[in-house]
Image (tube, rainbow, N blue to C red):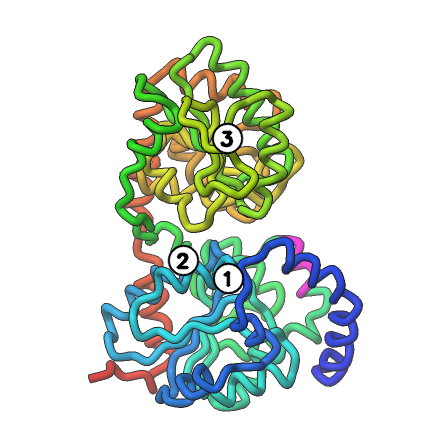
């Protein structure tokens, strides 16, 4: 079966290649390091990896998983300060985030795509004794070849949707051997454990450790945003509303709500932080259509500097979202309304005790969203037309904003500890990893 996969996967990739190139050019932020995705490492990087003594290799694909992995790595370093480590990711934005925030001494690479030759090259250089994979990265070559070389492989902070579970179970003869390669499978919720069990059966390797997202330390750069807000919005009293991790369609929804509500709440100010900064031109066009003045956080060649106050601050950089969450009064977390599905991480603004709005489509964070609803720690907006009334309600009731934020922060404090529970499971199944002295 693996032979068929190694024939079919490259063919499918070649068919997708033109779209992939367009996608990469659109996203930008690439460097020569990106060739590592295809198994090509510079002499300097190859030498640095070879010099490591059977390190722990930790892999997370995108920014969200990378942020959780950074918390995991920092805690592991507290337990084992001399453990050699390699961290890999799969996107340019995740790579940029990791490059800024990884602890010293952790080697950073792009994870090779699951081509046989690329994975073999990376494994040959790194020679890991343990491979830690975050969330849902089920790559046959990487997992099976790592195990064949003698490495323990564990899945951490794991989650599995109903759809994925049904798909894996339908093709059990293909996927069960891959899941069987894991020495431990640490998942976020009992529901995730049940979905994994549909694929591999009830198994002592499955552990419910909760989500590491509650363990995230506020990832800020101690930046005081008030001077920036004064420049953008003026020095009058203000209520800052940040719409974070927004996707296409959500900016229109947010801007129309803002235009309607500022008539009754003139102190309202809007910060837009699109999930993908390369969409800034698209979002600027939305602001033009809605006739809202704006300023870009990072001016471009086409933008004009304007000292007068504006309606909207558009954040067109990466790595700033948590700073703006921390400086806001009300937060909307995107990919959950206006035709978008999946949701983003509402725990991030909760860390700062903020009043949170999110849409009903939180499929990727279903358990977290349910927990917030149970504890009345966020407002779930059911329909697009309910968004403006929900925001109006928070603007009109400062006490409710404070109560929501307080409940959100208490929830974060209550459910922390998943990183330590996960590390305990790793140490239990990997006794060959004694504390480094």
Q: Which residue is mark 1?
A: 135
> Which region of the structure is painted magenta?
162-168
Residue 352's tag is none
Q: Of 126 and 179, which appears nearest the observer?
A: 126
The residue that mark 3 highlights is 380
Please rate how many residues cluster around mark 2, counting C-alpha atoms within 10 Å: few if below 14, some from 14 to 19, many from 20: many
Image height check: is 329 above or below 26?
A: above
State which mark lies toward you, 3 or 2: 2
- Main SS category, magenta section: helix
Q: Are marks 2 and 1 in contact (CB under 8 Å)?
A: yes
Of marks 3 and 2, which one's residue comes earlier in the chain?
2
Asked whether disc 1 touches disc 3, contact meaning CB atoms under 8 Å apart, the reply is no
The answer to whether residue 164 is magenta is yes
Question: What's the distance in space between the residues labelled 1 and 3, CA to CA?
Answer: 25 Å
Q: Is 12 included in the stretch rendered in magenta?
A: no
Question: Which element is circle 1 on?
Answer: loop
Where disc 3 sits, the SS reads: strand
Residue 53 falls in image quadrant:
bottom left
Q: Is residue 134 left or right of residue 338?
A: left
Q: Is residue 365 above or below residue 138?
A: above
The C terminus, quarter of image = bottom left
Residue 344 appears anywhere in the view: yes
In this view, the residue farthest toward the left is 437
Residue sitting at x 64%, y 34%: 249
């Amino acid at each position: 079966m693996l032979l068929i996969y190694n024939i079919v996967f490259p063919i499918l990739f070649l068919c997708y290649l033109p779209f992939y190139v367009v996608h990469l050019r659109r996203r930008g932020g690439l460097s020569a390091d990106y060739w590592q995705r295809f198994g090509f490492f510079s002499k300097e990087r190859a030498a640095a990896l070879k010099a490591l003594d059977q390190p722990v290799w930790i892999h997370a694909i995108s920014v969200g998983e990378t942020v959780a992995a950074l918390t995991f790595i920092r805690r592991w370093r507290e337990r084992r300060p001399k453990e050699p480590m390699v961290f890999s990711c799969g996107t340019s934005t995740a790579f940029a985030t990791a490059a800024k925030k990884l602890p010293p001494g952790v080697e950073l690479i792009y994870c090779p795509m699951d081509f046989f030759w690329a994975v073999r090259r990376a494994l040959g250089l790194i020679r890991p004794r343990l491979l830690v994979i975050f969330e849902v990265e089920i790559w046959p070559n990487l997992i099976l070849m790592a195990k064949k070389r003698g490495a323990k492989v564990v899945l951490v902070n794991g989650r599995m949707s109903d759809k994925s579970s049904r798909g894996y179970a339908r093709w059990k003869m293909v996927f069960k051997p891959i899941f069987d390669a894991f020495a431990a499978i640490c998942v976020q919720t009992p529901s995730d454990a049940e979905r994994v069990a549909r694929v591999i059966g009830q198994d002592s390797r499955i552990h419910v450790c909760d989500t590491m997202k509650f363990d995230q330390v506020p990832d800020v750069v101690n930046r005081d945003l008030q001077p920036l807000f004064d420049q953008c919005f003026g020095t009058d009293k203000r209520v800052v509303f940040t719409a974070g991790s927004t996707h296409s369609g959500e900016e229109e929804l947010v801007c129309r709500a803002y235009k309607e509500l500022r008539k009754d709440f003139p102190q309202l100010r809007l910060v837009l932080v699109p999930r993908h900064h390369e969409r800034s031109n698209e979002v600027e066009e939305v602001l033009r259509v809605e006739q809202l003045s704006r300023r870009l956080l990072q001016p471009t060649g086409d933008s004009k500097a304007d000292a007068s106050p504006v309606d909207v601050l558009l954040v067109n950089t990466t790595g700033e979202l948590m700073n703006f969450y921390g400086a806001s009064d009300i937060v909307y977390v995107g990919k959950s309304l206006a035709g978008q599905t999946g949701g983003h991480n509402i725990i991030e603004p909760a860390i700062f005790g903020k009043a949170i709005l999110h849409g009903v489509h939180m499929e990727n964070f279903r358990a977290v969203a349910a927990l917030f609803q149970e504890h009345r720690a966020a407002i779930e907006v059911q329909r697009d037309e309910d968004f403006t009334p929900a925001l109006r309600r928070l603007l009109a009731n400062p006490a409710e904003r404070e109560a929501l934020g307080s409940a959100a922060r208490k929830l974060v404090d209550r459910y922390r500890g998943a990183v330590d529970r996960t590390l305990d499971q790793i140490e239990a199944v990997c006794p060959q990893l004694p504390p480094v002295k």
